Image (cartoon, rainbow, N blue to C red):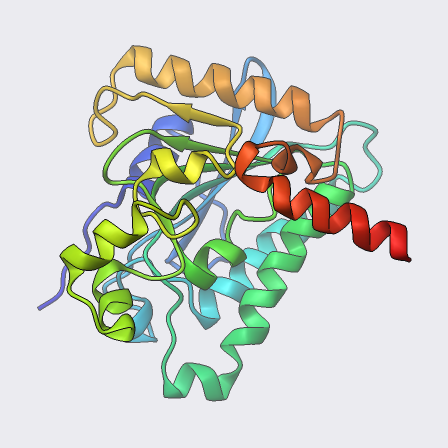
């Protein structure tokens, strides 16, 4: 029988919002809580495992139908609640999502719409002036990452082998490319967008910070202090720019930047 286990996402939600009451009216696999960083109110959101999930494919922390619509709900309600406030509340997406919860039933019921709704809600929050920060503490995979966190103003990740940002896992990619996992790893290491290690991903310019945490599964006080100070700096930076332009400056994004320049000139 499957049992609930605490994920890194849930652990860090608890760590950053200790003793905070969870928001009511959400599905069990989406948790949100309000806490503060240096005296400023912040809303933290995480997708967590739920062994009793109505959709079994989403039982291990995947983002499925319920999770997508619930993320859209909590983010949109945050935007609505702050609509008349001059200073918008920061939103921190605590990210540890192994996959989107795809399957025949999920596809039929419109998982694409649920995930798109979540992504749109985060984008709307960012454009409305909410500093949206993605804190990647574990896996950030495929459509799950697109729905939960990728639209953030700033992305912060732990420099740890348990952190993985990719379109699909190694085993799946190996099957599709007709390679062994070992051969895939060797090939991927030579192509930064394909590589599975977080240091290669960082060269793409999408991460604002790569943090060295002594033990992400049992953080020390200094680990927590580092994360909080980095979040605070990211929030301050995000207030200055609601776009995603900061992602385009890395050496491995030069071609992307050049394509954008030439397309802009042609228009």
Number of dots carrying numbers: 0
Residue 145: percent from left, percent from top:
46, 54
Q: Is residue 37 above or below residue 172?
A: above
Q: Quadrant of the C terminus?
A: bottom right
Residue 111: percent from left, percent from top:
50, 76
Res 18 visible = no
Q: Is residue 245 above or below residue 195?
A: above
Res 38 visible = yes
Q: Quadrant of the N terminus?
A: bottom left
Residue at the farthest right position: 267
* In-front residue for pair 265/118: 265
Q: Residue at x 34, y 52 (%)?
A: 48
Residue 132: percent from left, percent from top:
62, 37
Image side of residue 35 versus residue 169, left or right: right
Place residue 133 in its image quadrant: top right
* In-front residue for pair 142/34: 142
Q: Is residue 91 above or below residue 69?
A: above
Place residue 184 in its image quadrant: bottom left
């Amino acid at each position: 029988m499957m049992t609930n286990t605490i994920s890194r996402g849930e652990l860090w939600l608890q760590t950053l919002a200790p003793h905070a009451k969870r928001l009511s009216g959400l599905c069990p696999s989406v948790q949100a809580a309000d806490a503060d960083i240096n005296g400023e109110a912040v809303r933290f959101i995480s997708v967590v495992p739920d062994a009793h999930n109505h959709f079994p494919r989403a039982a291990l922390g995947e983002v499925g139908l319920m999770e997508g619509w619930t993320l859209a709900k909590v983010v949109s309600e945050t935007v609505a609640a702050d609509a008349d406030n001059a200073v918008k509340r920061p939103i921190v997406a605590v990210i540890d999502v192994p996959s989107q919860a795809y399957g025949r039933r999920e596809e039929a019921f419109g998982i694409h719409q649920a995930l798109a709704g979540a992504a749109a809600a985060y984008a709307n929050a960012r454009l409305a002036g909410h500093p949206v920060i993605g804190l990647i503490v574990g896996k950030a995979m495929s459509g799950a990452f697109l729905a939960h966190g990728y639209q953030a103003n700033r992305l912060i990740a732990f420099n740890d082998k348990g952190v993985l940002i990719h379109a699909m896992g190694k085993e799946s990619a190996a099957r599709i490319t007709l390679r062994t996992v070992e051969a895939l790893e060797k090939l991927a290491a030579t192509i930064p967008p394909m590589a599975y290690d977080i240091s290669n991903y960082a060269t793409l310019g999408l991460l604002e910070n790569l943090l060295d945490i002594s033990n992400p599964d049992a953080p020390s006080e200094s680990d927590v202090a580092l994360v909080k100070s980095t979040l605070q700096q990211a929030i301050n930076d995000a207030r200055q720019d609601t776009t995603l332009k900061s992602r385009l400056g890395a050496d491995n994004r030069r071609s992307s930047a050049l394509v954008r320049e030439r397309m802009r000139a042609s228009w």
